[in-house]
Image (cartoon, grey):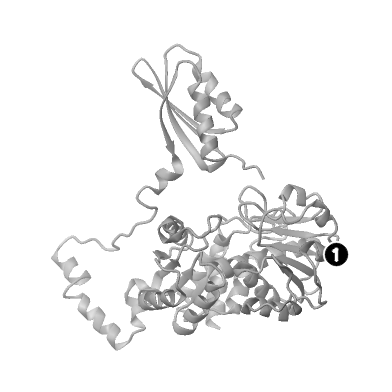
Amino acid sequence: MASAPSISYSITIRLQIAPGGTAVSLLTSTVEDAGGIVTALDVSPSGAGLRIDLTCATSGTDHADRVVAALEEIQDVDVHKVSDRTFLMHLGGVIETHAKHPLRNRDDLSMIYTPGVARISQAIVADREDARRLTIKRNSVAVVSDGSAVLGLGNIGPHAALPVMEGKSALFKSFADIDAWPLCLDTQDVDQIVETVAAISPGFAGINLEDISAPRCFEIEARLRERLDIPVFHDDQHGTAIVVLAALRNALRVVDKRIEDVRVVMAGAGAAGTAILRLLVEAGLSDVVVCDVAGVVHAQRGDTDESLRWIADNTNRGGLTGTLKDVLPGADVFVGVSAPDLIGADDVAAMAEGAIVFALANPDPEIDPSVARQHATVVATGRSDHPNQINNVLAFPGIFRGLLDAQSHGINSAVLLAAADAIASTVHDDELGPHYIVPSVFHPDVHTRVASAVREAART
């Protein structure tokens, strides 16, 4: 898919315009002819001419260079400076800490720190649970990554993963008022990760594992859940699964089908695919076939990977073999969390009437959504430039808000199902349609609804 201009590649170009010329009238048309979109034009006098800050959206760094080059060709225009707005936003990071109480005098100092703080420590010695009440632990989540599977970037390591984890922490604060801390670990050893997270866990009320590659992520999560007395949540698995289930519930309402009755074909058996599958089965799905790079997963393949063995034992009740394209005809639902361009228009046309296509590979989906919509009734992607974006941000802020409020010591499938139902129910009957099956992450109610549902589920 060709990338459209995006705010994430937005630039501001400072231009100096000679007096009395016609260059100003050419700026917008020049940017548009070069494929950009002008989003702002700020003009101020400067010496004998004009200074113009022109902001435009481009589709990438190379495209931005072409836009700037086109502006440089205009007579009487001098390009002085080009600023990448995304880089400017990340200068010095996107999060910070601050004290909740001012340090104005000796009294403040003696209560916030020594000697008064010793009384707080003694209270926690007497009852360790008081750490949730008397420290930042009650509202803190660790966002932990080793940088081995960063979305769309791959194994980029802990330093390059840091801005992604900072952004995640900013989302926690913005959508759920949770203090989240990016912890990027300079190791990809399972034992070291488990030991490190366990060692820092006293300061947190929850652990959000992020962008850790499969199959290591399965073992890390399982061992930490067994060892810690706080919720451990792998967002790449469970966050995706929750939003997929919410979207599927509403998509099935659109086509008037039930999850118990449909046949689903999935492409992708990694961390996200396995978690989606498990949650859909918990929600009542019984007829599902899963495909990976080797084709249909079935018991006779002799896979040694534990998660693939589980898939073989719990799916494909018809014992099908072959490729994705072999098993897709007649399916009610396609869910892809795999790779670009796996299926085409003919494959979707061969699906059942009222077909649902979730092509979630990012940034390039398993099929161009505009092509899929020619034959499918409902189409969803992981992209923000198409309707029905499957976005984990719909889930994790509210989930952790509910878990922290409930002072939960763990997380189970009831919590995941409650979160999915809360997201789905945010879309009312009079709003529901093929192009609106999940709410926006900026919906005023979605995060509070999820938090409330999770809080209730965690306490039962």
**Which residue is more in the foreground, 153 or 224?**
153
- Assign the N terminus to one quadrant of the image: top right
Residue extending farthest top: 20
Crowding at mark 1 (Cα within 10 Å: few <14, some 14-19, many 20+): some
Asked if residue 216 can be seen in this view, the reply is yes
Dividing the picture into quadrants, the one containing residue 230 is bottom left
**In the picture provided, is 145 more to the left or to the right than 373?**
left
**In the picture provided, is 11 more to the left or to the right than 91?**
right
Asked if residue 433 can be seen in this view, the reply is no
On the image, the x and y values in percent for residue 224 come to 47, 79
State whether residue 78 is above or below residue 404.
Answer: above
On the image, the x and y values in percent for residue 52 come to 43, 25
Label tally? 1
Q: Which residue corresponds to the image point at 60% horizontal and 78% vertical from the top-left?
A: 413
Disc 1 element = loop
**Which residue is more in the foreground, 313 or 250?**
313
Q: Which residue corresponds to the image point at 36% horizontal and 83% vertical from the top-left?
A: 129
**Mark 1 lies on residue:** 330
Q: Which residue corresponds to the image point at 54% horizontal and 71% vertical from the top-left?
A: 452
**In the picture provided, is 41 more to the left or to the right than 325?**
left
Dividing the picture into quadrants, the one containing residue 415 is bottom right
Dividing the picture into quadrants, the one containing residue 106 is bottom left
On the image, the x and y values in percent for residue 183 come to 39, 65
**Which residue is more in the foreground, 123 or 222?**
222
On the image, the x and y values in percent for residue 226 come to 49, 84
- Assign the C terminus to one quadrant of the image: bottom right
Kind of residue at disc 1: Gly
